[in-house]
Amino acid sequence: MSRKKFIAGNWKMNTTVEEAVALAKGVVEAVGGVSDVDVAVCPPYTNLSAVSQAIKGSNVKLGAQDVHWEAKGAFTGKVSCDMLKSVGVTYVIIGHSEQRQYFGETNGTVNKKTKAVLAAGLLPIVCVGETLDERNGGKMDAVIDGQTRGAFEGISASDAAKCTIAYEPVWAIGTGVTATPEQANEAHVFIRNILVSLYGKDTADKMRIQYGGSMKPDNAKGLLALSDIDGGLIGGAALKPADFAGIVQPK
Ligand code: PEP
């Protein structure tokens, strides 16, 4: 089964509006014409509108880093799916490990957000991944199983097929330590098998599983060559157009 690769840049809490526009323009210049890989950038909320304009007319799509599941109302500090749609967002990152670690994200809130995003016609990027303690304690499979099944509870196969999963071992995020291609692919195959058990092989084969965790131009090729690694969710290296381009089109 061949799945189109998908590389998304998670800019996290970086960039002012001016910096975001410059970065977006750099990304468009470097990879805006690429059509054999799906490419997205995910700036902070404050810069979505400006980046939406900066990428217009290119193949680069816009993503958000989070969303709230409610449609509107008294939820100070939160942003809804319709608000994201109104500024041109296509993808929404859900359940990033930093959200889980610092801001109380649970498998339950990931599930609510995933349902809301799908209902709004947006495309979720659902993050899963184990901490170093969980891996060393032999809990990796149980953690990934719980996160994946939790995220997709009550979601139909046709909706699940629209989702991307990002496998991000927490110990590899922003640390410079990358999972070896074999470690990563093993986890991806494990996740694919959970999807097969939930939705059957046809749907599971359609779903893209990105790797995330210190992916860079010099390790991207090896990771992306593996059977079940369908792209990358990129943090640090997404902040430099040349590095990001070196992952989209690794040499
Ligand atoms: C991330 O946080 O999604 C990520 C993968 O970060 P980095 O590439 O910096 O490890």
Image (tube, rainbow, N blue to C red):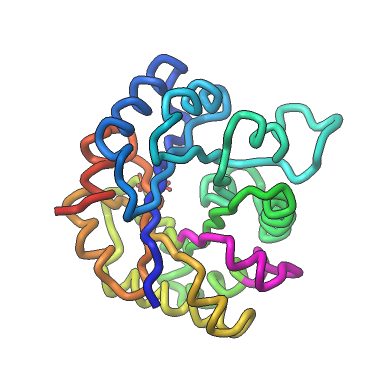
> Looking at the image, how many numbered discs can be counted on the residues?
0
Where in the figure is residue 74, as x and y percent of width and height?
Answer: 85, 30
Query: For the magenta stretch, what is the residue range?
Result: 149-166
Residue 5, horizontal then vertical, whole percent = 36, 59
- Please state if 244 lies on the left or on the right of 138 as rendered: left
Quadrant for the N terminus in the image = bottom left
Question: Front-most of 86 and 147?
Answer: 86
Above or below for 188 versus 151: below
Residue plotted at (32% across, 72% down): 183
Q: Residue at x 41, y 60 (%)?
A: 210
Q: Nearer the viewer, residue 206 or 140?
A: 206
153 left or right of 72 in image: left
- Which residue is at the far top? 18
Which residue lies at the image location 53% right of the left edge and 76% below the top edge? 204
State the image coordinates of residue 172 (x, y, percent, origin top left): 35, 55
Residue 164 colored in magenta in the image: yes
Residue sitting farthest toward the right: 73
Residue 25, x across and y down, in percent? 34, 25
Tell me which corner region of the image, top left, top right, bottom left or bottom right, holds residue 156: bottom right
Q: Residue furthest left?
A: 251
170 displayed left or right of 77: left
Q: Residue 200 colored magenta?
A: no
The residue lying at 48 percent from left, 32 percent from top is 43
Q: Is residue 217 above or below residue 192?
A: above
Say if 144 sits above or below 45 in the image.
below
In this rendering, the answer to whether 201 lies above or below 30 is below
Q: Closer to the camera, 141 or 91?
A: 91
